[in-house]
Image: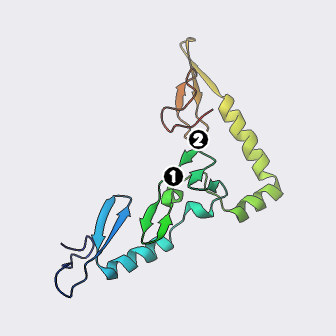
């Protein structure tokens, strides 16, 4: 067996047997050196743990259960890297003091109410989470699963 990163041979007598990790792209085995490099990389990434909307493996903003990347005994919720709603507690408090949070919520409510009519029969609404259009008769966005 080989390390998925550097190609070093693993296993055998007096050799590194490797560490198996479950990453975003699946389960892979790495040598000890690459394991520590990967762990260091993930320690420096933005994580949902620091977001004001995150609680117990769940995002309160998009109302979805999040799947962690497990490296050793550490779980990393790296969905924050691409999340448009990510905001730290400190940033949230600063914006709340300035009144920006109230303005943002008012803007979000306006987006929820935005209705686009096509052919006067089909009414579409814009999803407040992913901004894609979907049929008004649906209770859940078919694109991201967000509820109205």
- Up/down of 38 relative to 47, above or below: below
Q: Residue at x 54, y 40 (%)?
A: 130
Q: Which residue is mark 1?
A: 66
Secondary structure of residue under mark 1: loop
Disc number placed over residue 47 in the picture, else none: none
Viewer-closest of 94 and 67: 67
Residue situated in front as seen by the camera: 4 or 91 = 4
List the single residue furthest toward the front.
Answer: 13
Q: CA distance from mark 2 to mark 1?
A: 16 Å
In the rendered image, residue 44, in percent from the top left (x then y), is placed at 51, 73
Above or below for 143 versus 118: below
Q: Residues within 10 Å of mark 2 (few under 14, many from 20)?
A: many
- The quarter of the image holding the N terminus is bottom left
- Which percent across, then down, holds residue 62? 59, 45
Instruction: Find numbered disc 2 in the image and state the secondary structure of the residue it sits on.
Output: loop
Kindly report which numbered mark, 2 or 1, lies closer to the viewer in this rendering.
1
The residue carrying mark 2 is 129
- Classify 136 as above or below 94: above
Q: Count the marks.
A: 2
Question: Which residue is at a point 47% across and 59% down the rendered structure image?
Answer: 68
Looking at the picture, how far across and down is residue 14, in whole percent?
20, 88
> What residue sits 77% from the left and 45% below the top?
103
* Res 97 quadrant in image: bottom right
Q: Earlier in the sequence, mark 2 or mark 1?
A: 1
Q: Nearer the viewer, residue 112 or 21?
A: 21
**Which quadrant: the C terminus?**
top right
> Where's residue 52, x and y in %?
67, 57
């Amino acid at each position: 067996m080989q390390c998925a990163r550097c190609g070093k041979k693993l296993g055998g007598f007096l050799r590194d047997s490797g560490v198996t990790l479950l990453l975003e792209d699946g389960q892979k085995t790495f040598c000890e050196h690459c394991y520590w490099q990967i762990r260091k990389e993930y320690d420096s990434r933005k994580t949902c743990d620091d977001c004001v909307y995150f609680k117990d493996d769940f995002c309160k903003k998009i109302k979805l259960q999040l799947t962690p990347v497990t490296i050793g005994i550490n779980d990393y919720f790296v969905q924050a890297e691409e999340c448009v709603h990510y905001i730290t507690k400190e940033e949230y408090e600063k914006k709340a003091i300035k009144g920006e949070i109230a303005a943002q919520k008012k803007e979000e409510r306006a987006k929820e109410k935005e209705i686009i009519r096509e052919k006067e029969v089909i009414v579409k609404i814009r999803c407040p989470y992913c901004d894609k259009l979907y049929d008004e008769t649906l209770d859940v966005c078919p694109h991201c699963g967000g509820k109205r």
